[in-house]
Image (cartoon, rainbow, N blue to C red):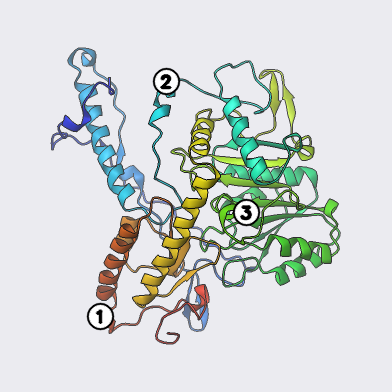
Amino acid sequence: MLRELNLQTVESLPDDFDPTTVINDPLPPPVADTDADCSVVNNGGKLVNGKEQVREIVLGRNVHTSCLEVTEPDDDDEVTGEREAQMASVLARYRKSLLERTKHHLGYPYNLDFDYGALSQLQHFSINNLGDPFIESNYGVHSRQFEVGVLDWFARLWELEKNEYWGYITNCGTEGNLHGILVGREVFPDGILYASCESHYSVFKAARMYRMDCEKVNTLISGEIDCEDFRAKLSLHKDKPAIINVNIGTTVKGAVDDLDLVIKTLEETGFTHDRFYIHCDGALFGLMMPFVKLAPKVSFKKPIGSVSVSGHKFVGCPMPCGVQITRLEHINALSRNVEYLASRDATIMGSRNGHAPLFLWYTLNRKGYRGFQKEVQKCLRNAHYLRGRLTSAGIGAMLNELSSTVVFERPQDEEFTRKWQLACQGNIAHVVVMPNITIDKLDDFVDELIKKRAVWYENGKLKSPCVANDIGEANCLCVLHK
């Protein structure tokens, strides 16, 4: 029905039509992160009487105040067609809002530059890859042949032979981390998880879910793991194996942990290769770094256990998904045969989205190594342009060498933050420059930010905040450091 409607000509809903249900109950109060192990308070507190106070986390709007109510159809709805017309109008307005929000999207690492029209013919099928990707189940509507093709491509990228790896296409980057850390826990049931303070929250979620002992490691000002602190914490637990999360691009600052230095630190502290497991969280930059000149390699020729990336970030898949690769020798500790499936269970989820492998396979075939290399170069070039514009305008900003994430002073206006969909933490915000982010869009953003700052700081009468503790004195442009 909806395909036959011309949504461009659908009239707007009448003024008296209100599809929302308003609930006035407030959201629960935020839980502050006051972990004493980290040298920097991640919530970016203010100094009060010489003591750093935790900043209250600003949560987004309560969606219950704008949700679309589901109403039961009337007896004569099938005759009048009024319900279909109303739903078409709602969808038309929703599409318009998506176009607007996509236009002002800078803070989250999603590549919105894609066209999958060729795959629309497959949306009528319930494609489910339940069970092991390499073993067919009795459910025949699957896309395993595409999934394994994608996994082979990533195994080659990370230098692991077909007969030496196991993997699957996950529902998101978090699932990749949950699976990688779970494999590490199954290989070393009494192991301790080590992760830097700036690791993705899913890493610490895994520690809670699996009841693992977890050591948070301090970071350098860049966001990279501090291997001296890592060495100190390893020395306290030499009697237990180590399970380490290595960030190939941290969430906020885009910092890349030095994998070779992490391995060297383990070896020098007395951990042989059979007493540690390394999971590499490459959610965004895991697919970008192989195409950056002189960048260190993430490779299974090194003593790592697993790597995960997100498919909806740099690749540009329209639904959340990811890729998780581990060594075949490790997966036996986790897998179980399931008669109901006529397959093997070694994944986090049971049913798995069979459409995601199609989108990933389609993109990999269209772009290939050369296509990704061009896009990576474009992102890095535009990220350097953005940092230059910000610093020229007197705005403190930082860009890590191997990253397209530009970190800068947090905007003072939450409406501005919502408009541009910026990700903020404490005193800083960031823009993640993806293939769909053009120079024109960056210029629009910076021009508006400059105008807003003139209002916030009354044309220089008020001082802009110092962010030296967040991005370093060399990158801060407050009155003390510029």
Which quadrant is the C terminus positioned in?
A: bottom left
Name the front one of labels 3 and 2: 2
Mark 3: give few (<14), some (14-19) or many (20+) Cα within 10 Å: many
Q: Position of residue 91 (x, y in %)?
A: 27, 33
What's the CA distance linking mark 3 and mark 2?
38 Å
List the residue tagged with mark 1: 459
Q: Position of residue 49 (x, y in %)?
A: 48, 83
* Callout 3: SS: helix
Do callouts 3 and 2 mark residues in contact (Cβ within 8 Å)?
Answer: no
The answer to whether residue 468 shows anywhere in this view is yes
What's the CA distance linking mark 1 and mark 2?
57 Å
Under mark 1, the amino acid is Asn
Q: Residue at x 49, y 44 (%)?
A: 315
Q: Position of residue 66 (x, y in %)?
A: 29, 43
Q: Which mark is residue 204?
A: 3
Name the front one of labels 3 and 1: 1
* Callout 2: SS: loop
Frontmost residue, 482 versus 387: 387
Q: Position of residue 61 (x, y in %)?
A: 35, 51
Q: Residue at x 36, y 71 (%)?
A: 389
Mark earlier in primary sequence (1, 2): 2
Q: Which mark is residue 124?
A: 2
Under mark 3, the amino acid is Phe
Frontmost residue, 217 versus 166: 166
Q: Residue at x 48, y 72 (%)?
A: 45
Mark 2: give few (<14), some (14-19) or many (20+) Cα within 10 Å: few
The answer to whether residue 348 shows anywhere in this view is no
